[in-house]
Image: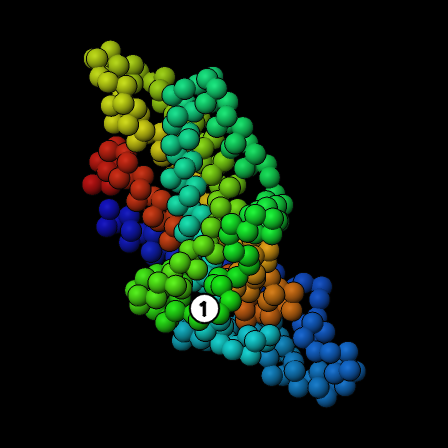
Amino acid sequence: MQRLIAQRLLLMLPLMLGMTLIAFVVSHTLPADPVAANLGQHSMEDPTIVAAFRAQWGLDRPLPEQYLTYLKNLVQGNFGTSIRTHMPVSDDLARYLPASAELAIIATLVGTLVGIPFGVISAVRRNSWIDHVVRGVSLLGVSSPVFWLGLIALYVFYFRLGWLPGPGRLDVGIPEPSHVTGMYTIDSALTGNWPALNSSLRHLVLPGLVLASVYLGLVTRITRSSMLEVLSADYVRTARGKGLRQRSVIYRHALNNALIPTITVLGLAFGDILAGTVLTETIFSWPGIGRYAYQSAVTLDFPAIMGVSLVIAAIFIVVNLATDLAYVFLDPRLRRRTA
């Protein structure tokens, strides 16, 4: 186990280096001018202002020199300064990332805690009315666009019924909780700020469910398919032949093996949720890394684009490592191989 973790951690260095190169080349070869994206029309007509802008952000240097300078600063822990916000990129990421992480954790928990039982029930009750209902719900979740679900959810539950609050992370008039982690729910609970805790939880419901809907359907379908395959295996038939109860056969013998493909989907889904929250965060005015990445891409904010790319790449690497460790935990054969 320790050797597996050490190998994966060592692989992070070339992977992160490759990620910086790809992000740098792609962002700097786009057919667009960051000067035009950040300066007004009047300023663009003044060559002195344009030259000063390029010199300030190092855009007047050759691309290889710009990349090497970025790597030198990155080794020192300097992600650069955002062209759009004029703040250190590390500060911007520390501000926006917790909001997206809070949303991604809620969406992943909902997709896991609901999708896996749905998949198991659908497989055990194959071709029954429960199976048809679960399959219909999962198909609806997978095929429905996130932006459409978000708009419908806001219209029904906020505008028409008034059951849940609208966009934002807190109700108007409720101050932000004292900063501990940047996640309002955790910070509110740790500091005993119960009004902020109640408000932040209510604001999480709509975007969390909308973001979870796609992955809930995906987890349900993967779990169902895997369970159907496992339930027809020889060792499951042997367990049933021994007279074991149905519950024991399903949860002690079948589910562990059936969860291995689901764990893969969940690992990729969490990284995908965290990286792909742009539409959800825009619809619900959620100040997360998705909106930050979108605004940085629109203004060709190269330091911010590089910073977001590195953070998302690191998250995917860590999540994949956690997924591999989950494989070892679930499958005894892998534990013997890594021993």
Residue at 34% of width from left, 57% of height from top?
10
Residue at 38% of width from left, 39% of height from top?
113
Judged from this view, the residue extending furthest toward the top is 241
Residue 220 image offset from top left, x and y in percent: 45, 33
Pointer 1: what residue? 174
In-image side of 214 versus 267 (left or right): right
Judged from the image, the secondary structure of the residue bearing numbered disc 1 is: loop
In the foreground, 121 or 265:
121
Residue at 45% of width from left, 54% of height from top?
202
Residue 136 to residue 244: above or below: below
Residue 335 image offset from top left, x and y in percent: 23, 38
In the foreground, 327 or 161:
161
Q: Decide if residue 306 is in sight here.
A: no
Location of the C terminus (image quadrant): top left
Image quadrant in which you'd find residue 26:
bottom right
Residue 1 to residue 228: above or below: below
